[in-house]
Image: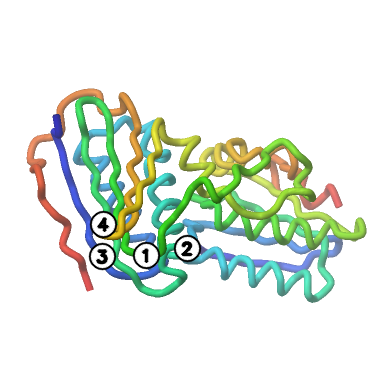
Amino acid sequence: MELTNVDMKRCTLFRLSGRIDGSVAPELGSQLRAATDAGRYKIVVNMKGVTYASSACLRELIGAWKTCRRWNRGDLRLAELSPNVDKVLDLTGLKSQLMVYSTEAEAVGSF
Amino acid sequence: MTQFRRELVLTGTKSELPRISRFVEEACDGANVDSAARFDLQMAVDEACCNVFEHAYGGSAGELDLRFETRGRDVVITLHDHGRAFNPEGVPPPDTTSPLEERPVGGLGLHLMRKLMDKVFFAFSPERGNTLVMEKHKVVPGGPKRGSSEGRSAKPSK
């Protein structure tokens, strides 16, 4: 897994790539928690380069999503899903729950 | 009838998941599995092995025996571990229709295994430990590639 994040004017943008299985998902969770602990509750996660996302990755995203949305203070939105990630979100019923954008610009602009 | 068989035996933790994924990828190549089914097999095995390391062994290093074989046009995955007994009935299926705020975070791995595979079967015995058998049907279009061998084991690497 490779992860970069940048604080933008209206949100924090995470760009993920590579394989996110149970061995590396906790690192994703700790990076997302670092953002929310710093009061950044508007988050975009660009998953364009993610070749594989296991349920452990989804658990971290859902956990951060819940933290962001508490008291209507923000949201976690996804952008540029690869076909494999799209399939996993579909199978778990998350696609209809999370806001998903086809481009990073759209997701960032939604805040 | 078993036509193609590979086995991986290792002792480790979740850090072995990438190696397990490579094993499945190579086995799919060797068995000439349909490209559309490879992701499903990879993910089901990854989720199953992650569950073993996380729950059966509770994060400690443990032994895992993974077998990949074809029977006719089907792929059969068999996974053995000697960790804590796993009872799938104790894992309620996730409610994938209710609002996400109301859902507990968990149970997705088992849910995905059942969605991605055609058959998922768990058994436990004090002697053999946990056994998981997963089947994916009609994903091997023809015979295995030349050069494949039956019963060959992958050597655990350091």
Decide which of A3, B49 is in the foreground and name it. B49
Quadrant position of the C terminus of chain B in the picture: bottom left
In this rendering, the answer to whether B48 lies above or below B158 is above
Does dot 1 land on a helix, a strand or a loop?
loop
Q: Amino acid at mark 3?
A: Leu
The crowding category of the residue bearing disc 1, from other C-alpha atoms within 10 Å (few below 14, some 14 to 19, many at least 20), is: some
Quickly name the residue at label 4.
B128
Chosen colour scheme: rainbow
Q: Residue at x 60, y 66 (%)?
A: A28
Work out how far the residue at label 3 is from the one at label 4, CA to CA, in angstroms: 16 Å
Q: Are marks 3 and 1 on the same chain?
A: yes
Quickly name the residue at label 2.
B55
Which mark, by number, is residue B83? 1
Q: Amino acid at mark 2?
A: His
Q: Could you tell me if the residues under marks 2 and 3 are in contact, i.e. CB atoms within 8 Å?
A: no
Work out how far the residue at label 1 is from the one at label 2, CA to CA, in angstroms: 8 Å
Quickly name the residue at label 3.
B10
Work out how far the residue at label 3 is from the one at label 1, CA to CA, in angstroms: 14 Å
In this rendering, the answer to whether A55 lies above or below B58 is above
Q: Could you tell me if the residues under marks 1 and 2 are in contact, i.e. CB atoms within 8 Å?
A: yes
Q: Are marks 1 and 2 on the same chain?
A: yes
Q: Nearer the viewer, mark 3 or mark 4?
A: 4
Percent x, y of residue A57: 57, 57
Decide which of A63, A1 is in the foreground and name it. A63
The crowding category of the residue bearing disc 4, from other C-alpha atoms within 10 Å (few below 14, some 14 to 19, many at least 20), is: few
